[in-house]
Amino acid sequence: MYDVSFLRKKIESVMIHGSESRFTSFFETSLYLISLAYAGTVSLRALSYKKGILKSRRLPCTVISIGNVTVGGTGKTPLTIHVAGLLKGLDYKVAVLSRGYKGCKEKSGGVVSDGQRIHMSPEAAGDEPYLMALKLDGVPVLVGRDRFEIGMLAIREFGSEILVLDDAFQHLQLDRDLDLVLLDAVCPFGDGHFLPRGILREPLRQLIRGDAFVLTRSDPVALPSGYQVLNALTKGRPVFQCIHVPDVLTEVRTSPSAKGEKVSYDLDFLRGRRVLAFSGIARNEDFRMMIENQGCAMARFLSFPDHHKYSDEDLQTIRRSADQSGAEHVVTTEKDYVRVAHRVSWPIKLLALGIRVSFGDEENAFSNYLNQKLSALCPRC
């Protein structure tokens, strides 16, 4: 029997590290041919919605979509949290809708948080929705594959005026008023190949559906390689640049079903301390560098696949590695933290390093853009 996990790792390796050539190996050639069929199917689907052959449903409120055209960590969750916080600050009744990828409630749907209390575990809600619920005070978070139905639930239960859709650029079943599209400034389009040969989820010409674009991990000194291509594709629509910066170190003393007591530490807390760090995200190396930039001594770093479901053996490996390396603290991402913090007893402090979006000098420009758009889309009574 062929090892499914081995096959998945091999495909992911080709997607991320494969050569630009289409025919380097038989395996890459096979993935390339499958990717052509995938691209054709995606294009036909988009055309069907555009021509009205397939119908989008309309919710009776303002809908904002946050998404991308690639797989991997472009930073949709931090931007969703940022946008929802901005909208709440403008006194809109806002809720966040997520598919709940790999959560037990993905199919049936439901309320992860009412804005005050969390009603689902990370396993039920999915990693990102649970994290958003944990970080967003006063903003309900809901999950479900049918976003029209959970959108109606948000309107009925919470009187939501604005719904923010997490990872929904391809969710054409639901009409939206504003599409914010994220692109990784370092590698906005991958190697130009579609899934499963590359990381593109749909043809770049579909960027025409976007209303504004956000370049994440943007370095203002070194312009991204795809910037000229992006300018041609966006056709004069707004393009903002942001980076992800460390926010706070947090220890949450609670059970998974409640927000509980958060104990926060300054980032300087790690300086000079010996730590073991681990993560299971799309860009583990980025997280490692962020930890090292806090001035700590990295005893060991453990990498796991994105959305990894940690087994008891994994957790024992982490605990054992921390003990053998003489680490003073264990540090992980917020997304990984909510999956593992309460499953075992940690002999040393387990901390989550939070990140946030920073638009730098463009913060006011981005906020003003949203405010102006919403003033027209969702006027006050």
Image (cartoon, rainbow, N blue to C red):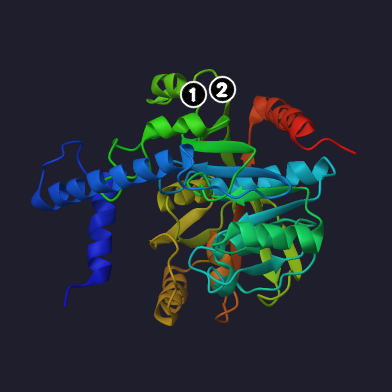
Left or right of 18 on screen, residue 247: right
- Rendering quarter of residue 175: top right
Left or right of 165 on screen, residue 45: left
Q: Which residue is at the far left? A: 26
Which of these two is toward me, 205 or 371?
205
Residue 346 percent coordinates (x, y): 57, 77
Question: How far, Cα to Cα, is label 2 from label 1?
Answer: 6 Å
Question: Which residue bears the numbered disc 2?
Answer: 237
Residue 65 percent coordinates (x, y): 60, 44
Q: Which mark is residue 278?
A: none
Q: Are marks 2 and 1 in contact (CB under 8 Å)?
A: yes
Which of these two is toward me, 108 or 304?
108
Q: Is residue 356 visible?
A: no
Left or right of 77 on screen, residue 381: right
Q: Which residue is at the far front? A: 53
* Residue drawn at (65%, 29%) of the image: 360
Does residue 276 sit above or below 171 in this rendering? below
- Crowding around mark 2 (Cα neighbors within 10 Å: few <14, some 14 to 19, many 20+) is few
Q: Is residue 43 visible?
A: yes
Question: Which residue bears the numbered disc 1?
Answer: 234
Q: Secondary structure at mark 1?
A: helix
Which of these two is toward me, 135 or 355?
135
- Rendering quarter of residue 369: top right
